[in-house]
Image (cartoon, grey):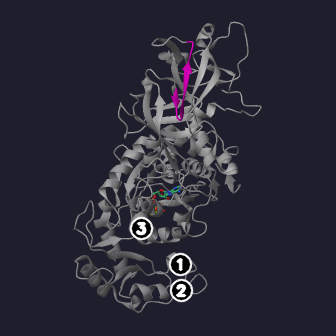
Amino acid sequence: MADTVTAESGTAEVGRDFIRDIIQADLDSGRAASVVTRFPPEPNGFLHLGHAKSICLNFGVASEFGGKCHLRFDDTNPVKEEQLFIDSIQRDVRWLGFDWGENLFYASDYFEQLYAWAEHLIETGHAYVDDTPPEAMRAQRGTLTEPGQNSPFRYRTPAENLDLFRRMRAGEFPNGTCVLRAKIDMASGNMNLRDPVLYRILHAHHPRTGDAWCIYPTYDFAHGQSDAIERITHSVCTLEFEDHKPLYDWLIGNLPVPAQPKQYEFARLNVSYTVLSKRILTTLVRDGHVSGWDDPRMPTLAGFRRRGVPPAALREFVSRVGVARANSVVDVAMLDSAIRDTLNPIAPRRMAVLRPLKLIIENYPEGQTETLEAINHPDHPELGTRPITFGREIYVEQDDFMENPPKKFYRLSPGKEVRLRYGYLVTCREIIKDDAGTVIALRCTYDPETRGGNTPDGRKVQATLHWVAAADAVEAEMRLYSHLFARPDPGADGDVLADLNPGSLEVLTGCLVEPALAAAAPDETVQFERTGYFVADKDGTPERPVFNRTVGLRDTWAKVQATGR
Ligand code: ATP
Ligand code: MG
């Protein structure tokens, strides 16, 4: 498996992968009668693109094999968890296109059962209460090359441990006084088996259980047992949990759980120019580096939605990436091309001018306008046409004009004739400049015989420009987004914030759009002809719409990098 997955090496089909092969084999051999998976987010942030991979995998295999997928909140750390995140996660999983039906669960639903199992471990001599201060406990843990040392509290009797654990629950001790640890092996080559912590004291209000508890299970203690309670058949997680698997199995093996779930690991999604760590995304939001969790530059599902990325594009991307066991970094260009490939067939075409340059068509009667017909999608005649206005003053893109063009510049320049999309052929006759020498308008003529862009004499015109009419164009703001980080491997030098791209948001005001766009609904992405895919933002009003650029028409990033602009 290559280190980098590129747009070329990805495949468009939902392929078989080792997880699906394992499930198929388990069903064939009867080891599993049906498939039950789960997606287990911790409600301490919004879902991001990496989670989308996990969601598509867990919900995807469940539906392909006729099973079910649970949504389970891993809500074991009340200090960082909030109802806001619980709500956003449900909304985003649904938005991505998946449904857990009745199967919505919370690890906190199992706190009483988990507590009883902790007492079971104590009674069977498999767990003890440790008063060692955190610092000393870390030192006793040893290193990858040196074994750890047994805690002096490891030899407490089950009766003594039970008493202490009950007093922990009763709230007798402040945070950090003691913890409950599994009694496994301080010399184990696997650090996770060196008497891992199962419960810690946290006097904190929990979004669901309120103040009922002041001790909370760790991820390791809650996760596998929750899987067992829910009779998960395939507990699929990312590779960093591979080292936790022996502990997962040890706990399942030493507890009277109702089922024997198995954990399987796959490679987490990494994308170039992108950070998929909730901790860092939380910092970006908290410290105001972005406008919020749904900032269109964020790799969160809420950010993608606001940027105009349809959920089908994310599912397509995830399916092109596939599921592997080896870690890799996916080229962000592959995401952009999945977005374009999804939007191209469905996005209605519209015209918008980002940096307007006025054209005065001298031989067009003053005060007159006419209505032309613009098609909504070149490949879908059934999407129909819309009326657009043409008149004496129109606007084109500043970039589509050059006073002294190089040889291969086919667009507007003095004396040059171009076609206006759905309109007429116009020829540039004269440049109007302000005192500073800046071009502020062009005087042109049009050929009345070329309505609809036809050339009755068959003469060749090499450029077709998009435009809007001064008579009815609506002023708009455009937000042009590019990568939030300026290097492919943000944070590789240690400081991820130093790698933020200062040019990740460019705001253009005074842009002009055709009137049909003023009423555009947020979340309906359109293609601005020749410019890119855009979506109306909730910050806009019908009088002054705001658009987010979802993605350009082709990869301009490589060019930007090469030329520095
Ligand atoms: P972070 O490390 O950013 O805090 P997390 O893994 O702790 O993320 P969880 O809410 O615990 O976040 O994740 C829920 C599920 O999503 C887990 O099963 C986790 O393995 C999976 N997941 C998280 N990040 C990725 C990723 N980049 N690629 C694939 N799956 C991921
Ligand atoms: Mg986690």
Residue that mark 2 sits on? 142
* Crowding at mark 1 (Cα within 10 Å: few <14, some 14-19, many 20+): many
Q: Does the magenta stretch include residue 362?
A: yes
Which residue is label 1 attached to? 191
Is residue 180 a member of the stretch shown in magenta? Answer: no
Q: How crowded is mark 3: few (under 14 residues within 10 Å), some or many (20 or more)?
A: some
Q: Can you tell me whether the CB of the residue at mark 3 lies under 8 Å from the nearest atom of ligand 2?
A: yes
Quarter of the displayed picture in which ligand 2 can be seen:
bottom left
Instruction: Provide residue 100's location: percent of width, then percent of height.
Output: 39, 45
Crowding at label 2, few (<14), some or many (≥20) Cα neighbours within 10 Å? some
Of the image marks 2 and 3, the number of the one nearer the N terminus: 2
Please provide percent x and percent y for residue 552. Answer: 58, 38
Marks 1/3 in contact by CB < 8 Å: the verdict is no
Instruction: Report the disc number at residue 219.
Output: 3
Q: In which quarter of the image is the N terminus?
A: bottom right
| Magenta-tinted stretch | 351-363
Instruction: Name the quadrant containing residue 337.
Output: top right
Three-letter amino acid code at the position of disc 2: Gly
- For badge 1, the amino acid type reads Met
Q: Where is residue 141 in the image (x, y as percent from the top left)?
A: 50, 85
Q: What residue type is labelled 3?
A: Tyr
Q: Where 200 falls versus 555 (above or below)?
A: below
Helix, strand, or loop for circle 1? Answer: helix
Is disc 2 placed on a helix, strand or loop? loop
- Magenta-highlighted stretch: main secondary structure? strand
Alpha-carbon span between mark 2 and mark 3:
22 Å
Q: Which of marks 1 and 3 is nearer the N terminus?
A: 1
Quick check: marks 1 and 2 in contact, CB under 8 Å? yes
